[in-house]
Image (cartoon, rainbow, N blue to C red):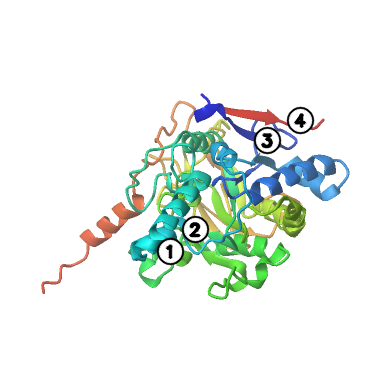
Amino acid sequence: MCLRYGRDLWVLVLGKFPTHHKIGIPEFKYVANMHGDETVGREILLHLIDFLVNSYGRDPVITRLLNNTRIHIMPTMNPDGFEATKVPDCYYTRGSNFRVLQEKKENSTHRDLFQLENSITLLNEKRYNRNGEDLNRNFPDAFENNSASIQPETQAVMDWIKNETFVLSANLHGGALVASYTFDNGNPVTGSLKGYSRSPDDDVFIHLAKTYSSNHASMYKGTGCDNRQTFPDGITNGYSWYQLEGGMQDYNYVWGQCFEITLELSCCKYPPADQLEKFWRDNQVALIEYIKQVHLGVKGQVTDKNGNPIPNAIVEAKGRPHVCPYRTNEQGEYFLLLLPGTYVINATVPGFKSMLKTVEIPDNTGNFSALKQDFSFPEVSDQIRSRVTSCPKTPLYQELTWASAAVKPTIHILVLMTVMLVIFK
């Protein structure tokens, strides 16, 4: 099924095994142009595709990266919005542009009202899809009920995430210069009362954001798009910047088992064409170094006594429980992004005793392979398999808050997704 007005979503898959998932090879993705008027990410990813294809077999680092990583690139998630954007426009993001304009509208005089109405209408046409929906407010949310109707583009991406084993991702935006990380939304369970919404893997997310910012030409300086906005080291917790409901970043982490950060790559959302080459040069090193981080941590297979894979087994690092437990895929594989250090990995097949293994994780990103640690359950036969379904798309952290409050004493007083494959021979 095509998107409205017949425009498909296209994904380019690069690697030694572009047509299928290969056991042990992690999946990575870049997604851009989620908002139609934010065009820099789209152009950068087109440059990245050209660079990777032409460097394969010539550059030893890129060759090893592609041989050991399956890279998915979606240059445009909102093709209808992109087609509606024709004229370069240089405005930046202070939280949400739409929200800022709405606030101005509420406080404006009659004389300014007409101009603000036109600005809001123009912003909608450029930023949103053809149905007038913001795709980065359109995903299921882990903290509150999202009443927005799921759009074809959103559903296609959700299906894509479900059908692949993505480990690491980034979505590319414009309107600021910063690497923003999970969570975008929050509640008291994640520390929102202190203005920061912390995930169980906060240290890893900070590392991922700093990896990109420190390898960018200027993001690491932390300079915002005006004097009122700065970002130390060029990174920010999403919630600390501004609260966002229904974002793709949090959805990937909670329900996709994929660590995703948001990259704001330009103060101008739609700069003139003659500036695009410089944006590519500024981001080239950071894009590659970030992909390498998919090889952080530990990976392996969970099998039964006959060596057959066990899907849906829970595999987590002790002390880092996810609200939707991370499970093995159909091949019994798991991937956990972890910084170098000592960890206890807990593998659980429902109905059987958990298996614990202590691992010492090195920094293997330069070797393009995470530490390998398999689990074999001798009590499990191929006739006994875990058939646990995936977590419901409900506000899981909201439910966790209610459960926590209940134990406290009371104080009285696809759309069809067309995939173009590049096969390396």
Q: Where does residue 52 sit, x and y in percent of width and height?
A: 78, 43
Mark closest to the chain's N terminus, 1 or 2:
2
Residue 418 position, x and y percent, is 61, 28
Counting residues from the start of the chain, the first of labels 3 and 1 encountered is 3
Q: Name the residue beneath numbered marker 1.
A: 197
Tell me the quarter of the image containing the C terminus. top right
Q: Amino acid at mark 4?
A: Ile
Q: Are marks 1 and 2 in contact (CB under 8 Å)?
A: yes
Question: Considering only order in the chain, which callout, 3 or 4, is on the residue closer to the N terminus?
Answer: 3
Residue 3 visible, this angle: no
Whether label 4 touches label 2, CB < 8 Å = no
Report which residue position mark 2 lands on.
182
Q: CA distance from mark 4 to mark 3?
A: 11 Å
| Mark 1 element type | loop
Element marked by disc 3: strand
Query: How far apart, in angstroms, are the residues tagged by discs 3 and 1?
Result: 33 Å
Q: Residue at x 66, y 69 (%)?
A: 220
Query: Which residue is under mark 4?
Result: 423
Relative vertical location of residue 358 with respect to residue 311 in this rendering, above or below: below
